[in-house]
Every structure is written in structure tokens, then in C-alpha cells.
Amino acid sequence: MSKPYQYCIHSIHIDMYQAPRTELRRLQRSGGSLVVAVPHAWAKALGLKKGDPLEARIEGRVLLLLPWKGAQAARRSISLRYAQGQEGAFYNELVAAYLDGYDDIRISAEKGMAEGARQLIRALTSKLLGLELVEEDGELLLRVMADASGLAPEQALRRMHVSTLKMQRWALEAALGREEPKKVLDEDEVVDRLYFYLVRLLRGAASDPSLALRLGLSPLRLLDFRVASQLLEGIGDKAVALAQAPRLGHEGEGLLRLLALLKEGQEQAFGAFLSRDMGRTLAAHETYERARELAGTLLSSNRGAELAVVCSLLLDIAGLWVDLADLAGPLRE
């Protein structure tokens, strides 16, 4: 991932978290039904009042009471102020607001917006999926246009998987002097956009049970998807490093065999993650061991530093999809 600044992701304070998170309540009988009183602090934190509708659901042995939002949930908005000379911190704030689930990000500046900051904002819209600059009249407005249900987590993860496989092939071709690194860098932008979109979506689902239910993800599966997206994004970063590694000009056939093993292993690992099939997990581990053996054979026949770098990066990629395969264990929910 190309990072002009170090991303500093923070939690933005929300009033509802001031309320106690757990409290013991007893069921009371009212006519032919059982009722439970909602603590006043909870109702206040959620903006509920007498007569407001609640959505009631049963998920396994869990009873969920959710504020009913109707067909359209309210858009969340935040205002940020730009200070000249603080571009790095400002960039972090914008990324954090996107990941924290804000739909509208209003930007103001006391002494006017520097051209550098405007360019930074425009660049950000190309890096974060669904984010568009829709207003530019003294106060800038960044609006997230992507609907949370428009691209499901599994779809986004599949796209990352496919993109990282292509990146590995192109990166090795670049290391062999047969391809330019630009294709890998361009595809990395695609992976980054999907990664940030997934982080935003999964964080939103973690804090909004109704969204998690719509996405069909339990709390444990949300965590797995978060880790899986990070592993695939890491594979993309390793591919970028491989594309920028010193050129080889030899060992092409052996490295292509190693790359074929990596593709086989990642397919096994990704399939294991989606299906929770431990058989595929074991197959991915076996493929990883074959890849290590082949890399060792290649290095024993040629001790060049360039080949060692390339083999190391390829094995780093394999280590990441092995971790992905290990997420396939059955969940007890």
C-alpha cells in the first residue's frame, strides 16, 4: 500500500457509549405478555422515547431489540477543521472519519484551504471506495456514496483475492525484467480501496447489530473477515515489494514453478476460509511445505542476493495465506 502518511486510526467519542453497557433486568407480566423496562440512560443514549418502534429479533439464544430505522438509516455527519501545515494529521483524521462510518465529512479552514490540502483531498477520493467530493464553496463536503449493502463483505474479499493473485504474477514478471512494476502498483490501489471499504463496513457491523444481521455475519465471523482482509492486503503489499525488487534475469523457470505453488496454496486457503473446510486448510499447509522445499532447492543452486530476496518475498506471501487458511476452524457461536 502506498502510504503518504502513517494512518493513525482512532475511535471518535460517541455519547451513547457513556451509558452503562450491561444491567440486570427482570421480566414482568403485563396481561398475557412478558415485558422488560429499558433503562432511562439507554433510551436517552439511543434517542428513544415513549411510542418509538423497536425491531425485535431472535438470533440463536440471543434476544435483540433494535431501534427501528425504517427503510433508510440516518446519515452520520462529522465536521473537521483543516489547519495549514498539518496535512499529515488532517489526512489521518479524514481516513479515520471514513473508517468510523461517517457518511458526510464537512471540512472547513479558518484561513482558507491550501492547494496542497485540496490535492490531498482529491487524492483521497480515489483511494477510498465510494467517497466523492460533492461540494466546493468555501466549505468542502466529502460524501460516501457507496451503500453498505451494495458490496457484501464476501464479494469484496473475493475481489481482493483475485487482485492479489494477478499482482503476484505481474510482480514476478517485473522481477524477471519482463514487466513494468506499474501494473502491480495500479492493482494495489484497487486492493487498498477494497480493504478500507471492508474495514469501514465491518466496523459498522460490529457496532450496529442490525447491519451485522443484514450482512449475515456473527460477531466471530466479523472478526475473521477483518483478519482475512488484513492478510490479503498484506499479500498485496508483498507483491508491490516484489515488483520493486532488484531485477534477476535468470532462474525464471524455477520461480514460475514456485509462483504456481503459491497460486494453488492461496486458492486452497481462500476456499478453506469461506467454507470452513479443515481439509482445505491441511492441503494449504502441505502446499506451503512444497513451496518451501522448492525455494530451498532454488537457493542451493544459486546463492545470488537478488534470488534470495525474491524467494523470501514469495515465502512471505505464502505465510500470509497459511494464516488465512488457519481461520477456517469451525465456529462455536
Image (tube, grey):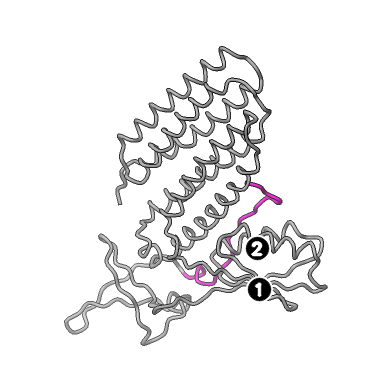
| Helix, strand or loop under label 1 | strand
Which residue, given by chain and number where applicable, does mark 2 sit on? Answer: 94
Where is residue 260 drawn, in percent x and y? Answer: 46, 30
**Crowding near the residue tagged with mark 1, few <14, some 14–19, many ≥20 C-alpha atoms within 10 Å:** some
Residue situated furthest top in the rendering:
301
Q: In this view, does 304 lie to the left or right of 21?
A: right
Magenta segment main secondary structure = loop
Label located before the other in sequence (1 or 2) = 2
What residue sits 39% from the left and 32% below the top?
Answer: 284
Viewer-proximal residue, 65 or 261? 261
What residue sits 59% from the left and 59% below the top?
Answer: 128
The three-letter code of the residue at mark 1 reads: Leu
Q: Give the range drawn in magenta.
A: 1-19
**Crowding near the residue tagged with mark 2, few <14, some 14–19, many ≥20 C-alpha atoms within 10 Å:** many
Q: Is residue 184 left or right of residue 317?
A: right
Number of marks: 2
Which residue, given by chain and number where applicable, does mark 1 sit on? Answer: 141
Residue situated furthest bottom in the rendering:
51
Where is residue 90 drawn, in percent x and y? Answer: 71, 61
User: Which of the 4 quarters of the picture holds residue 300?
Assistant: top right
What residue sits 50% from the left and 42% below the top?
Answer: 231
The three-letter code of the residue at mark 2 reads: Leu
Q: In this view, does 305 lie to the left or right of 269?
A: right
